[in-house]
Image (cartoon, helix red, strand yellow):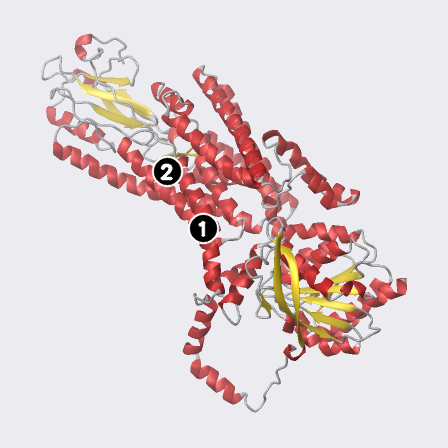
């Protein structure tokens, strides 16, 4: 390959050069038909690669959403040190959470403004300050990367990227796998886990920084992006996330579109040097671009023989067919320029026109470097490399798309989550359209993130409240009513035959509605607990006589009413125990309070006011019992009220209560439907499902460990169709491993109840039980056992006094 070239061969200043950006290739062609053909090819090429981008982006976001809804580690946010220490309330609990306090050191380097405040303006200013600090860090690291690249410190850059990849593939992946196994109660061999993680990390490093199958490299880039997004969601304060998304999108505009933007400079410098951008920073939907190579190999035989015009035309068409864009043809018809993009390298091949017609001289040059003479080349692919044809998207785009969607899904509002997902894909599609129009590198964040933010706040603040209001006013038929109507229509004859066959054996139905009393309750609600709400609440008071052993207050699930505990009425009367069955706002037995009484804070405030109105502070002993969703409130109320000596609390009973992670009942009730009377009750039942405490229940459990008078019983069924058994078992083991009972039948339950009584009298604080053949309503199938447990709590407290 010769290195000198005369000016007469077209290597002077007057020769044409073109630069390509992103996936756009520019080819000069003569004739309107050729331009139309190229434009049609461009549209086909772009459409297929839009799908190739939608799939990985969707997979990355789906992984983040799945994790946010199943692994509580990434969803729990500690607000600040003062609140954290105050909530722990003891040195022992603080030591147990010592690993989480380390988060403050990491977070306060980037987000120092985390002071708790009730002022919206102050929250906004602090979040903006945190976002600007994050932006400064991003700008500094980007400029540092550009400086290293400009002065060709390639080893430093590769070392930097390799260390980052190692952290994600080994450390962060290990943490992720550990938390997933905790959430799903999986306990594989440590050797197996270490072996799998080591292989996963090593193969990932090879695929990203050396060579490997395209699909495998894409898989690793997607998972790395998802892990990074989860880290951002975990450590960024609530409001700061939205400000960070906004300022990063603005920075993306500046960095790519401004003449001196650092990312634009990086792309242009890489093109000038004919070098690929680092594989750890870019996702490619085509062949793995760092290892794609097409070479021009000199063929001495052909270089000495002139080529036929037909052969030259065939070569021109072959190269031009790989282009996806076009530019206006030059003024001179004699010179035809072909542009071909190969692994970030742009080659311009121009047949020599200064020689005679038979001359086959062709020059090959790298844009915009000095032209170099070369004999007619033969394009040859290396065996191990292929030509790159694909759309590229920075991993930062994957990360911040996933941060937006993951944060939206953390509130368990699927309307908002789906709206944000659609907005992101629409924005990405619109960006690709602009890419085809302008044929230059464009930022992928701004349109998608801005539209996602707009969709998020509109859906969460406007659409969701509107739909909830429509449900509450019965303007929309709930999905449970539709499904039940369809079932009745389809199975009308079967239902009729069943009724006839069982008409000789009628089952007596009873409820507690004849014992209903009504009381007016005023309590505090709202995000800041500064709103006053008044409702008319119906409740049932059983065995309200002097000299009882104690009083039990029952809290129903969601949905649920006082009748959920009707099977215990006669049993409590036999034990001389008073039972008060309550209803929550939103049920058919409470008037008012529907729109602002569904968070834990609202529900606990309501129940405390109800108990104060009923003068339960004056009873001799008090136990709070909760079923399903109410079990979580029973635990929290017992923890809160037992801080004051004015409440005679001696224990809590949790029946089929939720675990430390989202359970299938949330999806069941939101998607399949609820067995309720009408749409208002359905909406009221769905709203509290979005505000579970989950892992934060551990704080209440740990708090109760420090209170000697309080005893707790936790019972669950293995056949529970709403709450997974492994999640309930995790809660039971957190309470007490040494006082856990497995109950398969009634005979075993009688023995277990006596053992529980003995353990409480012996000073044990917690007892748990697994009813292996039962489902979600233990108060119906095993009311005798639960009443015995309550009686044993009262007995143990009386014996201590």
Residue in the foreground of this view, choosing between 773 and 131: 131
The quadrant of the picture occupied by the N terminus is top left
Dot 1 or dot 2: first in sequence order is: 2
Residue 339: which disc?
A: none
Residue 704 % position (x, y): 77, 54
Disc 1 + disc 2, Cβ < 8 Å: no
Q: For the residue carrying disc 2, how many other residues have a C-alpha within 10 Å: few (<14), some (14-19), or many (20+)?
A: many
In the displayed structure, would residue 672 be above or below residue 325?
below
Residue 121, by quadrant, is top right
**Residue receiving disc 1:** 459
What residue lies at 43% left-to-right and 27% top-to-bottom? 278
**Quadrant position of residue 331:** top left
Q: Position of residue 796 (x, y in %)?
A: 85, 65
Residue 370 position, x and y percent, is 28, 12
Which of these two is toward me, 423 or 389?
A: 423
Taking the image as drawn, is residue 297 in sight? Answer: yes
Query: Residue sitting at 59 percent across and 38 percent down?
Result: 235
Residue 339 image position (x, y, % from top left): 24, 25
Give the structural element (helix, strand or loop) at label 2.
loop
Q: In this view, does 52 lie to the left or right of 755?
A: left
Look at discs 1 and 2 and give the one toward the viewer: 1
Q: Does 792 sit left or right of 411 as displayed?
A: right
Q: Neighbour class for label 1 at 10 Å: few (<14), some, many (≥20)?
A: many
Instruction: Report the quarter where the C terminus lies.
Output: bottom right
Q: Distance between the residues labelled 1 and 2?
A: 32 Å
> Which of the 4 image quadrants contains residue 649?
bottom right
Residue 285 numbered mark, or none: 2
């Amino acid at each position: 390959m010769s290195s000198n070239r005369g000016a007469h061969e077209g290597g002077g200043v007057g020769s044409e050069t073109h630069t390509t950006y992103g996936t756009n290739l520019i080819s000069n062609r003569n004739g309107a038909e050729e331009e139309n053909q190229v434009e049609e090819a461009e549209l086909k090429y772009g459409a297929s690669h839009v799908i190739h981008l939608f799939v990985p982006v969707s997979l990355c976001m789906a992984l983040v959403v799945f994790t946010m809804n199943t692994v509580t580690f990434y969803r729990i946010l500690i607000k600040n040190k003062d609140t954290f220490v105050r909530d722990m309330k003891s040195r022992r609990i603080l030591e147990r959470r010592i690993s989480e306090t380390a988060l403050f050191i990491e977070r306060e380097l980037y987000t120092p403004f985390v002071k708790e405040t009730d002022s919206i303006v102050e929250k906004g200013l602090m979040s903006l300050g945190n976002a600007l600090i994050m932006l400064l860090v991003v700008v500094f690291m980007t400029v540092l990367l550009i400086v290293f690249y400009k002065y060709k410190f390639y080893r430093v850059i590769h070392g930097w990227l390799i260390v980052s990849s190692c952290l994600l593939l080994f450390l962060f992946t290990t943490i992720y796998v550990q938390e997933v196994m905790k959430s799903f109660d999986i306990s594989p061999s440590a050797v197996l886990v270490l072996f799998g993680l080591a292989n996963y990390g090593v193969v990932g490093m090879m695929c990203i920084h050396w060579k490997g199958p395209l699909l495998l490299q894409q898989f690793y880039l997607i998972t790395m992006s998802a892990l990074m997004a989860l880290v951002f969601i975990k450590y960024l304060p609530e409001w700061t996330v939205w400000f960070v998304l906004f300022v990063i999108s603005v920075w993306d505009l500046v960095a790519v579109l401004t003449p001196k933007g650092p990312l634009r400079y990086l792309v242009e410098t890489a093109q000038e040097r004919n070098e690929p951008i680092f594989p750890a920073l870019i996702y490619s939907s085509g062949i793995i671009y760092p290892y794609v190579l097409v070479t021009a190999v000199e063929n001495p035989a052909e270089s000495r023989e002139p080529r036929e015009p037909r052969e030259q035309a065939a070569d021109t068409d072959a190269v031009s067919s790989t282009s996806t864009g076009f530019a206006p043809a030059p003024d001179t018809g004699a010179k035809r320029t072909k542009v071909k993009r190969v692994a970030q390298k742009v080659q311009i091949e121009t047949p020599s026109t200064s020689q005679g017609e038979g001359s086959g001289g062709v020059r090959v040059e790298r844009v915009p470097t000095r032209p170099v003479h070369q004999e007619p080349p033969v394009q040859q692919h290396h065996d191990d490399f292929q030509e790159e044809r694909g759309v590229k998207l920075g991993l930062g785009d994957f990360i911040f798309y996933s941060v937006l969607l993951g944060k939206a899904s953390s509130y368990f509002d699927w309307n908002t989550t789906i709206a944000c997902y659609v907005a992101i894909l629409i924005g990405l599609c619109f960006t690709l359209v602009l890419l085809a129009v302008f044929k230059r590198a464009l930022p992928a964040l701004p349109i998608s993130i801005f539209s996602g933010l707009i969709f998020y706040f509109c859906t969460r603040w406007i659409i969701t409240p509107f739909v909830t209001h429509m449900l509450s006013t019965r303007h929309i038929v709930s999905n449970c009513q539709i499904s039940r109507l369809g079932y009745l229509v389809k199975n009308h004859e079967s239902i009729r035959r069943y009724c006839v066959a069982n008409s000789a054996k009628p089952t007596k139905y009873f409820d507690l509605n004849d014992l209903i009393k009504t009381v007016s309750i005023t309590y505090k609600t709202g995000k800041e607990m500064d709103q006053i709400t008044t409702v008319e609440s119906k409740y049932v008071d059983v065995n309200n006589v002097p000299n009882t052993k104690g009083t039990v207050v029952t809290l129903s699930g969601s949905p649920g009413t006082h009748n959920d505990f009707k099977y215990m009425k006669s049993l409590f009367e036999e034990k001389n125990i008073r039972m008060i069955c309550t209803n929550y706002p939103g049920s058919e037995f409470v008037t008012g309070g529907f729109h602002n009484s569904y968070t834990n804070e609202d529900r606990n405030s309501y129940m405390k006011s109800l108990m104060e109105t009923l003068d339960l502070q004056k009873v001799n002993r008090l136990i709070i019992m909760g079923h399903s969703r109410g079990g979580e409130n029973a635990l929290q109320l017992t923890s809160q009220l037992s801080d004051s000596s004015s409440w005679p609390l001696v224990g809590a009973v949790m029946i089929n209560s939720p675990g430390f992670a989202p359970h299938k009942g949330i999806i069941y009730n939101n998607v399949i439907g609820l067995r309720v009377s009408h749409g208002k009750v359905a909406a009221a039942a769905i709203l509290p499902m979005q505000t579970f405490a989950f892992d934060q229940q551990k704080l209440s459990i740990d708090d109760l460990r420090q209170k000697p008078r309080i005893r707790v019983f936790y019972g669950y069924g293995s056949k529970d169709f709403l709450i997974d058994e492994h999640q309930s078992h995790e809660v039971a083991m957190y309470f007490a491993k040494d006082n856990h009972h497995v109950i398969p039948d009634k005979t075993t339950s009688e023995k277990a109840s006596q053992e529980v009584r003995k353990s409480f009298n012996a000073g044990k604080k917690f007892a748990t039980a697994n009813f292996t053949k039962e489902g979600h309503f233990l108060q119906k199938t095993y009311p005798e056992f639960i009443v015995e447990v309550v009686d044993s709590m009262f007995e143990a407290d009386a014996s201590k006094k």
